[in-house]
């Protein structure tokens, strides 16, 4: 792990891995695999590729099931490799591709991992949603790639191990998440000691509401983020503020900062994307429009600073900027994440899986919005007593046996989801309020 600068006092910040090699910095066109190309991040990345066509060669694209969108992308960029969730989806995809184009199609989580380690690509954009993105990120790290990381859940589940692997293989993580990308830009090159890192949060659609009013919110209201257009899962996470909780854990791994030096401030305008506080008390901040093309272009084209297609910001029309302490009584997910970070990797996995399961239930009208933090907290309380696996966590070992700890994380993820589905079902049976009618899923289907 490279130290960015020596600590005189305060917290030393180190990148998760060293900045990408000189060779990569000069590599244009850049050979790129996009895991999750049909999602919100993936589509934005392809807009950047389209606007900078000479700078990229697309090696691989993937989706879970959205083959209509993947086939359209494949027809446009003609990558030699594609990946989808299972054989049936692959069969459907092949029917949508032109006769004179026969890419290799990888299948399932092992297939995504294969695509992330292809020797034909130097750069992997990890943009799958949730725990399902873990194997792709780990595989890219093991293969020494430059990883443009949107999938924050990878670091929540396996931050220690990903850091260890990056240090061993020279893989680099460039953060796509707008807050972490802002921190990356604020701290790089400043020969200063950092006192703290401040993550800004929009507060989501329910900023200023109280616990009572959250019991009645609808799915449409929860998905309607005031500033950002994103996929469904991260939109709900933003509304519960679990997204900021996951980002605290992500930042602690990216920058080696303990939880107590990571602060969250609610900033409803989403103009300041995060701040670094230096030892002398001064603050460095990155400002910009709320457009994911900015951090994406920064990572994909780094160290070039090219047009990303985002609007320029006019500070006179922005008006006042405000900053508030988060309301952790109304939004308990923030504290759950801090507790998980302090308690170790297993509990981070339980929290992440329980939250993903609860969000899935909410999106399927099978629990209320206010149930999401309650179900997540219950799962954390019930670990290890009622959430068990036959495996043990080895991810923090100096040289972890990758397959063993990946299996452990997947087992724990599955057990935590099952716990949440059965708890929600027993609650709905008792109250008759909600009907749990979705089939339990795990993040790792499709093998
Ligand atoms: N959206 C944002 O502005 C934003 C900002 C910061 C960070 N992030 C992070 O970026 C990641 C992606 O977010 P998003 O908003 O782009 O999500 P999204 O719109 O839901 O897209 C998710 C992508 O992952 C694929 N996928 C879904 N389930 C999968 C599975 N089980 N296995 C493999 N692939 C699967 C989807 O394929 P299908 O299309 O076939 O479903 C799609 O390509 C998340 O970790 C999120 O936290 C997003």
Image (cartoon, rainbow, N blue to C red):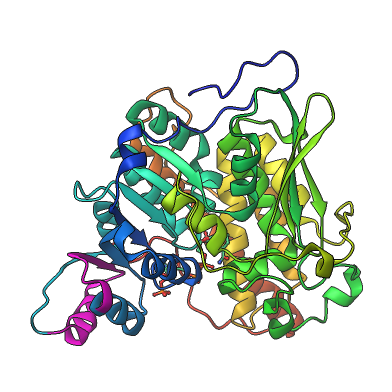
Residue depicted at 32% across the width and 45% down the height? 139
Horizontal side of 33 relative to 332 (left or right) equals: left
Residue depicted at 27% across the width and 77% down the height? 76
Give the position of the C terminus as an image quadrant: bottom left
Q: Is residue 340 above or below residue 208?
A: above
Q: Is residue 433 above or below residue 337?
A: below
Q: Specify the quadrant of the image occupied by residue 406.
A: top left
Residue 421 is one of the magenta-drawn residues: no
Q: Position of residue 41 (x, y in %)?
A: 49, 66
Residue 95 is one of the magenta-drawn residues: yes
Horizontal side of 236 relative to 411 (left or right) equals: right
Horizontal side of 166 relative to 89 (left or right) equals: right
Q: Specify the quadrant of the image occupied by residue 205.
A: bottom right
Camera sees residue 403: no
Q: Nearer the viewer, residue 116 or 44?
A: 44
Residue at the far top: name it: 8
Residue depicted at 35% across the width and 71% down the height? 63
Q: Position of residue 233 (x, y in %)?
A: 58, 69
Q: Position of residue 310 (x, y in %)?
A: 58, 68
Residue depicted at 45% across the width and 60% down the height? 127
Q: Specify the quadrant of the image occupied by residue 416.
A: bottom right
Q: Position of residue 70 (x, y in %)?
A: 32, 77
**Residues drawn in magenta:** 76-98
């Amino acid at each position: 792990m490279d130290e960015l600068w020596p600590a005189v006092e305060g917290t030393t910040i180190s990148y998760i891995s060293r900045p990408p090699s000189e060779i990569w910095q000069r590599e244009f066109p850049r050979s790129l695999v996009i895991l999750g190309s049909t999602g919100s991040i993936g589509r934005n990345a392809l807009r950047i590729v389209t606007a900078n066509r000479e700078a990229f060669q697309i090696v691989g694209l993937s989706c879970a099931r959205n083959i209509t969108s993947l086939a359209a992308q494949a027809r446009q960029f003609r990558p030699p490799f594609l990946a989808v969730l299972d054989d049936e989806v692959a069969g459907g995809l092949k029917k949508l591709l032109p006769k004179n184009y026969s890419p290799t199609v990888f299948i399932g989580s092992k297939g995504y991992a294969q695509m992330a380690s292809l020797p034909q690509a130097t750069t992997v954009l990890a943009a799958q949603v949730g725990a399902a993105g873990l194997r792709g990120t780990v595989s890219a790290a093991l293969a020494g790639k430059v990883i443009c990381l949107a999938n924050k859940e990878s670091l929540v589940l396996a931050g220690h191990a990903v850091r260890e692997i990056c240090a061993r293989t020279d893989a680099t993580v460039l953060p796509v998440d707008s807050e972490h990308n802002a921190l990356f830009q604020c701290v790089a090159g400043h020969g200063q000691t950092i006192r703290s890192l401040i993550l800004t949060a929009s507060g989501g659609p329910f900023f200023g509401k109280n616990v009572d009013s959250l019991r009645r919110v609808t799915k449409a209201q929860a998905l309607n983020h005031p500033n950002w257009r994103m996929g469904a899962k991260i939109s709900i996470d933003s509304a519960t503020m679990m997204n900021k909780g996951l980002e605290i854990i992500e930042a602690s791994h990216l920058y080696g900062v303990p939880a107590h030096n990571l602060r969250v401030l609610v900033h409803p305008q989403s103009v300041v994307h995060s701040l670094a506080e230096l030892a002398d008390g001064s603050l460095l901040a990155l400002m910009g429009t709320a457009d994911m093309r900015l951090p994406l272009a920064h990572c994909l084209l780094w160290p070039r600073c090219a047009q990303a297609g985002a609007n320029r910001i006019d500070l006179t029309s922005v008006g006042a900027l405000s900053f508030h302490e988060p309301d952790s009584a109304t939004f308990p997910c923030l504290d759950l994440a801090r507790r998980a970070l302090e308690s170790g990797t297993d509990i981070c996995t339980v929290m992440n899986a329980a939250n993903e399961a609860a969000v899935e239930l909410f999106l399927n009208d099978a629990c209320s919005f206010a149930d999401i933090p309650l179900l997540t907290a219950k799962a954390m309380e019930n670990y290890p007593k009622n959430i068990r696996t036959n495996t043990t966590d080895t991810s923090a070992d100096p040289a972890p046996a990758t397959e063993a700890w990946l299996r452990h994380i997947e087992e724990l993820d599955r057990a935590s989801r099952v716990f949440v589905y059965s708890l929600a079902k027993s609650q709905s049976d008792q109250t008759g309020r909600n009907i749990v009618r979705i089939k339990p899923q795990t993040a790792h289907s499709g093998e």
